[in-house]
Image: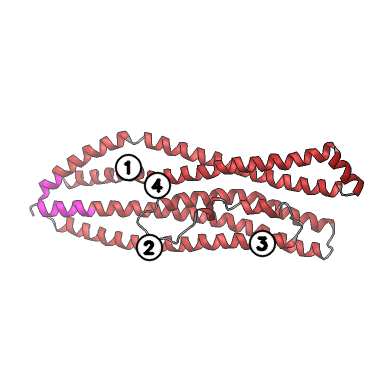
Amino acid sequence: MDERLNEINRELKELNEALARQGRMEAQWKDLQDQRAERDRRVMETGRVFRKEQDDVDRLEKGGLRALLLSLTGDREVRLSKERREALAAKLQYDQAQRDLEDLDGRIGVLLREKDGLRIDRIRRDALLEEKGELLKALGGETGARLARLDQQLDELEHQRREVGEAISAGRTAESALSAVLNSLDSAEDWGTWDMLGGGLLTTMAKHGHLDDAQAGIGWAQQCLSRFRTELADVRDMELPQVQVGEFATFADYFFDGIFVDWYIQSRINDAQRGVEAVDSRVCEVLNRLQWMDQELAEEQDGLKREREGLLLRSSGSD
């Protein structure tokens, strides 16, 4: 009887983990829908801005009265260069918003398919619970009831630790992505200092190369932060530092608003560093809290496991 009970418990644990995921899906589903609405608006907004900036470039390149007047004053090439930088910055915003929207749509699809696959698990779980109930009643009233309560508590703790662990993993990935961006910006700052002192073409190219690395890294960091935010929504009934929606939702935007329009200005690099450091500090704060939670849950879990083992060892099946 004990062997069969252990088999049932093992299978129920697996099923409960899968079914508990369904219970947590609503928080993630809502967050993904909120993020999608934000990103959809961002795609439309950045697309509108990009088209406007590109139209400005096209008008100057094709000529016309305005272009002629600027040519006469000698300002045409300066203005055209400025308009091209602004169009590039707008295009980067638009492309990133589209990639973020595609990423969210993929994750929404995965969540929907996961929900569809849980119906058979529910049927099997109900059958096992019926069988387990009969076995526990056969073991005896008080022992059976206490074992059932312990199993329920242990299952819930295991689910909570899984949720916290997934959030920790997502947070560490985001932290790593932010560190990579900071490294690129730090290198760009160093080369930029030499550039300001007259370092020459190679110095300028090195600075721009590190800014290109930062640009590439910021898109990945944006998506990592989005995943971290979604995993935090799955951590229930736990007190976490408050993270505002805007902190993780539109993290990359300020990069494209300034640094790639006026990237030749050293202060822009410094502003970007401070912005990334601020978000990185928030990620570290939440990670520290999650790690403390995991330790607390593990200690509670160990105590219940010892109690359950002792109860089974002491039970003769007649109490």
Mark 2 to mark 4: distance in Å? 24 Å
Q: Which residue is mark 3?
A: 271
Of all residues, the one furthest to the right in this rendering is 72
Residue 65 coordinates in the image, percent (x, y): 86, 39
Lower sequence index among marks 3 and 4 = 4
Q: Which mark is residue 19?
A: 1
Mark 1 to mark 4: distance in Å? 15 Å
* Helix, strand or loop for disc 2: helix
Lower sequence index among marks 1 and 2 = 1
Report the span colored magenta. 135-150
Residue 88 coordinates in the image, percent (x, y): 72, 45
Q: In the rendered view, does 185 fall on the left or right side of 172?
A: right
Q: Quadrant of residue 103?
A: top right
Lower sequence index among marks 1 and 3 = 1
* Helix, strand or loop for disc 1: helix
Residue 305 coordinates in the image, percent (x, y): 26, 58
Lower sequence index among marks 3 and 2 = 3
Q: In the rendered view, does 133 fall on the left or right side of 107?
A: left
* Identity of the residue drawn at 84% across and 56% down: 201
Asked if residue 192 lies in the magenta stretch, the reply is: no
Mark 1 to mark 3: distance in Å? 46 Å
Residue 99 coordinates in the image, percent (x, y): 59, 41
Q: Nearer the viewer, residue 38 or 147?
A: 38
Q: Which residue is mark 4?
A: 27
Mark 1 to mark 2: distance in Å? 24 Å
Identify the amino acid type marked 2. Gln
Lower sequence index among marks 2 and 4 = 4
Q: Nearer the viewer, residue 306 or 195?
A: 195
* Identity of the residue drawn at 73% across and 40% down: 54
Q: Nearer the viewer, residue 225 or 154?
A: 225
Q: Which residue is mark 2?
A: 295
